[in-house]
Image (cartoon, rainbow, N blue to C red):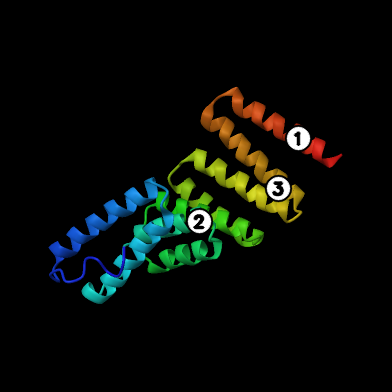
Amino acid sequence: MKGTPFMGLIKDEAAYLGVHVRVMNRIGALMSSRMYAQAVEAIDSFRKESRDVWGREIPEYMLICRGDAMAHMDRWAETVETLDECLRLGNPKSDADLFFIYDLKGFAQVEMKEYLQAAKSYKSAMTHSMKRDDMGDVAHACCNIAYCNMLMGRTLMAQTFYERGLDTFMDYFHTSYAYLLKHELQVSDRYRRR
C-alpha cells in the first residue's frame, strides 16, 4: 500500500467504519499469508490516515497485530515498543488480549536477552490468564517464567515455576502425558547438571 489509499473519503462515522473494516480484512489476509511487512505497512498507512482525516488513534487490536507482525519479522525492539504503546492507550482490553500482549512482549524480551523484564511480562500474562481461569495459559506462563529464571541462573526459582507450570498442566489436562513431560524434564535437568 503506497501512501494512504483511502484518503478523500467523507469524514463521517460510516465512512470511517467502512474503511476500518476493509483495512482489517486486508491486514487479516496479509497476516494469514505471512506477508508481515505489508501488514505493518497497511497498519501504519491506516494509522496516518486515521490521525490526519478522522483525528483518531487506531484501535488497540491493530497495534496488537502490528506487534505480532514485528515479532514474526524478528524485530524485537519494535515489537516491545508497539505492545507498550498498545498498553498505554488504556482502552478496555479483554484478559485474553492482555495475556497475548504480555506473552508476546515477554517472548520479544527473551530474544533481546532482557530476562528480568521478560519474567515480569510473563507474570503479567499469568495474572490475566488467572482472571480468565485459563489454566493452560497459566501453566504456559509459569514455564516461561521458569525459563527466564533459568537463563538468569536462578535455578531454585526456575525449578519452582517449572513444577508449578507442570502441575497446572497435569490438573488442566487430566492426563498422564503431563506427568511424563514432568518426569522427562526432571531427567533431562539431571542430565544437564552432570
Tell us which disc is closer to us: 2 or 3: 2
Image quarter for residue 181?
Answer: top right
User: Image point 42% across, 58% down: which residue?
Assistant: 37
The disc label shown at residue 73, or none: 2
Which amino acid type corresponds to the residue marked 1 in the rendered image? Ser
Q: Are marks 2 and 3 in contact (CB under 8 Å)?
A: no
Q: Secondary structure at mark 2?
A: loop
Tell us which disc is closer to us: 3 or 1: 1
Tell me the residue that label 1 is attached to.
188
Please give the count of numbered marks on the rendered protein.
Answer: 3
Mark 3 vs 1, N-terminal side: 3
Q: Is residue 21 above or below residue 55?
A: above
Q: Secondary structure at mark 3?
A: helix
Q: Secondary structure at mark 1?
A: helix
Local packing at callout 3 (Cα closer than 10 Å; few below 14, some 14-19, many 20+) is: many
User: Image point 23% across, 55% down: which residue?
Assistant: 22
* Image coords of residue 148 (percent x, y): 66, 53
Q: How far is the residue under mark 2 from the one under mark 1?
A: 32 Å
Which amino acid type corresponds to the residue marked 2 in the rendered image? Met
Tell me the residue that label 3 is attached to.
158
Mark 2 vs 3, N-terminal side: 2
Which amino acid type corresponds to the residue marked 3 in the rendered image? Ala
Q: Is residue 146 above or below residue 172?
A: below
Q: Are marks 3 and 1 in contact (CB under 8 Å)?
A: no
